[in-house]
Amino acid sequence: MITGIPQLLEFIGAQLRQDKLGRSAFVCWVSIPPYVILALWAVTAQLAISPVFTSGLTLIAAFSLSAIVLMGVLGALRYLHWIRAHAECYSYLVLGCYTLVVTTACYLLGTLNLITGLAMMAAPTMGMILFPPRLILGISLLSLIALLVLSVLAALDVIPYAPGLGIGFDITPNENLFITVSMILAASGYVAYQAIIFMALINAWHMREAEVRKLSATDALTGVANRRDILERLEGMIFGRQRREDRIALLMLDIDHFKQINDVHGHVTGDEALIAVAARLRNCLREQDIIGRYGGEEFLVILPGTDQHEAADIAERCRNAVAAIVLGTPQGDVALTASIGVVSRILQDGDDIDELIRLSDDAMYEAKRAGRNCVKIG
């Protein structure tokens, strides 16, 4: 990949994490390069056919420079203190000016050509990624109506069509070829630029969606799966299994005397205990195993393809890992232990998730009755 492109994609994608003020300023800055390309093309094409700036290309060059200045000034306004206090108004101002500039550019280049079509697709799409869709749809509709009116007026010869492309005097075939080829190259640059913008925004959008999904499935305190997610995974393993007689094992782990830890040492220490236990359990498990916080001080561990003997060994490893945890508190050290219930079954049609969890829960309570800090098989 070209050097600098990954950093550029990361920078562009980061705009999705900006507030409304930052996203509005981003629209200003990201709109400038296409008008730089347009201005360079217009000036180059004009100089190729005549040193006197009298054609429609001059109009395009002047418009492009005006657009660059306008959007640059709007982007710089973001850093003013009073603008920060009126972020909503600033967004409306930016989007209104952006729409006006794009609509004007489409009229100057012709309302019925490839560049106009690309611009009319790109602007609303980028807008709906960065801003509320309802707002962008309203602005896009106004822009579309304006272009339709301009097209009708041009068809009736009330106004000129594509005035920016009017030369106004005869040019040679070679000059015409140069203008055409240079226009294609400029359009290609615009398309490549928009492709980079959209690739970055869409990639960032997917990453943000994946992050949201991950957060919705993760216990905020311990970082392991939450109750809903681990139950959904268990359900998927049972009802989506590939073979009729797959085996699965469950561990139900409960931290001993957790209520007492909370009452005596405070909830902060209780939270530290949960975090420490979750971290130790993750280190004890295999890559295919899944751990989740089932509720309170209980953790549920899913061991796919694991028989009873192997599940008991893993449970014992987990118990020893928890027993090695010692938390320092102002009242003194707190040693943790855990009671673990184990159940292992060959899955059959009609197996019930609630029944499997109940069996592991019963085994865990049997470990409690046996004096805690032990493993019992259900």
Image (cartoon, grey):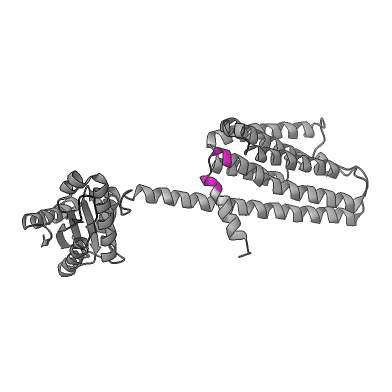
Instruction: Determine whether, in the image, residue 281 is placed left or right of residue 1.
Output: left
In the foreground, 323 or 73:
323
Q: Which residues are magenta?
A: 15-22
Does residue 19 show up magenta in the picture? Answer: yes
In the foreground, 168 or 304:
304
* Residue drawn at point x = 81 percent, y = 32 percent: 159
* Residue drawn at point x = 20 percent, y = 53 percent: 332
**Residue at the far left in the pictured view:** 370
Rendered image quadrant of residue 280: bottom left
Q: Is residue 76 visible?
A: yes
* Residue drawn at point x = 20 percent, y = 51 percent: 298
On screen, residue 197 above or below 108: below
On screen, residue 315 above or below 129: below
In the foreground, 45 or 173:
45
Residue 4 drawn at (x, y percent): 62, 61
Residue 283 drawn at (x, y percent): 29, 64
Number of numbered discs on residues: 0
* Residue drawn at point x = 17 percent, y = 46 percent: 259
Rendered image quadrant of residue 89: top right
Rendered image quadrant of residue 120: top right
Residue 307 drawn at (x, y percent): 18, 68
Instruction: Determine whether, in the image, residue 357 is placed left or right of residue 139.
Output: left
User: Is the stretch drawn in magenta largely helix, strand or loop?
Assistant: helix
**Which corner quadrant holds the N terminus?**
bottom right
**Which corner quadrant holds the C terminus?**
bottom left
Instruction: Determine whether, in the image, residue 139 is placed left or right of residue 355.
Output: right
Does residue 324 show up magenta in the picture? Answer: no
Q: Is residue 248 visible?
A: no
In the foreground, 110 or 45:
45
